[in-house]
Amino acid sequence: PPLHPVQIWGSDLSNSALERARRGEYRGRTLANVQPQYRHWFEPNETGLRIGSAARSLVQFEQHNLLDPLPAWATELDIVFCQNVTIYFQLATCKGLIERIYAAMAVGGYLLLGFSESLWGIFDGFETVELDGAFVYRKGATPAVAHRAAVVPSTNATTPSASTPSANVPIRRVTRPQPPSPAPQSVGQFEQARQLRDKGQQRTALLLLSQLAPADRSPAVLSLLAQLHADLGQPEQAAAEARRALELDVMQDAAYLVLGMLELQNSAWAEATRYLERALYLVPTSPTVSFYLAESYRHQGRIDAARREYRNTMRKLKDVAPTAVLDGVAAGWLHASCGRWLESLDRS
């Protein structure tokens, strides 16, 4: 038995997820990270391993919506795991959830978020602690710093679609407070991750960015994470990171580009056009933005606009080596594709 009384609660909105959790069965690659010293907590079954009855007896499960107040048992919590959840919430919703979790935690308690999740620009009450090369949040005797108000574009407490933030609001060039400058070390890691992406080493870049302290996960870092997830065929995570970046800083052109490309994949031409037009407004020299905008125009039947952006893409590529990789695409392929589509549009 444990030296001190232990109680573990698990919650999820999905009943099927709760049933899987109650079974506590693991097989295949999910067992790869079980270290030998923890194997005694498992018992073998027909397909792999199951958490032993001694450990299962410590856990209670219940259905709960994180948008609601926390259950009555959620007081003086020593450790909270809330992984791969907050990235799907709007900023105001996420801020409210973290405030509720903070209030329910014991002093000295730990909060563990997911691989690329951060409370940057959302909540400043926790201390940041490094444990074995990873960063976690700890509740101190007093808040780490005064909570700063997050930029809240909407009070809607529903999980957003890939179309948020609102693409109908025009971008204006205004003087606005800039996000805090990241530490020099994080700048170096950010640039290194960008270079790794250009070399096609997306997973290595993700691993590198995961080592950043939460306070260094700026909107630019979130935008790069969105690009990496998009490159790896992870659209939900890509959209979530891009939305978070734009909620913190509406001038993140890479985030608009990611959302525009995702909408293109979903055949949502109007939404794709709105995102890509905003990206082009911020980076008018980008050949990739012009190319994808031309694609969106073409699908909408806006032939003159499509021709214009295909030509703009070729013009912007004039001094770029064909082998150069731009946003994951070879410049030579972009140029050739523009030429083929211009010929096709002229014939039609």
Image (cartoon, rainbow, N blue to C red):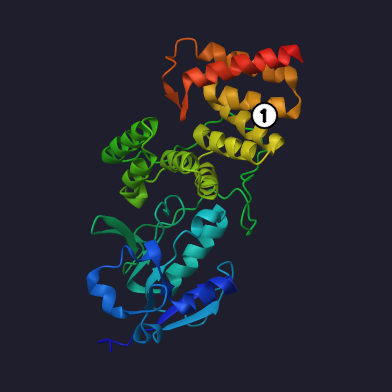
Res. 74 in view: no
Q: Position of residue 261 (x, y in %)?
A: 58, 35
Depth check, front residue: 28 or 142: 28
Tell which of 186 and 276 is nearer to you.
276
| Vertical arrangement, residue 146 with respect to residue 185, above or below | below
Quarter of the picture holding the N terminus: bottom left
Is residue 83 among the parts visible in the rendering? yes
| Residue 44 in the image, given as x and y percentages of width and height | 35, 78
What residue sits 54% from the left and 16% below the top? 335
Q: Is residue 129 left or right of residue 11?
A: left
Q: How many marks?
A: 1
| Nearer-the-camera pick, 343 or 45 | 45
> Up-down: is 222 above or below 117?
above
Mark 1: secondary structure: helix
Q: Amino acid at mark 1?
A: Ser
On screen, residue 325 above or below 55? above
Q: Quadrant of residue 26?
A: bottom left
- The residue that appears at 25% across and 87% down in the rendered structure is 3
- Image quadrant where one finds the C terminus: top right
Residue pictured at 53% horizontal, 77% vertical: 19
**Mark 1 closeness class: few <14, some 14–19, many ≥20 residues within 10 Å:** many
Please indicate whether residue 97 sits to the left or right of residue 158 in the image: left
Residue farthest toward the front in the current orientation of the protein: 46
Q: Which residue is mark 1?
A: 296
Percent x, y of residue 268? 69, 39
- Residue 162, given in percent of the width and then of the height, sits at 62, 46
Q: Quadrant of residue 311?
A: top right
From the viewer's perspective, tell me whether residue 337 is left or right of residue 10: right
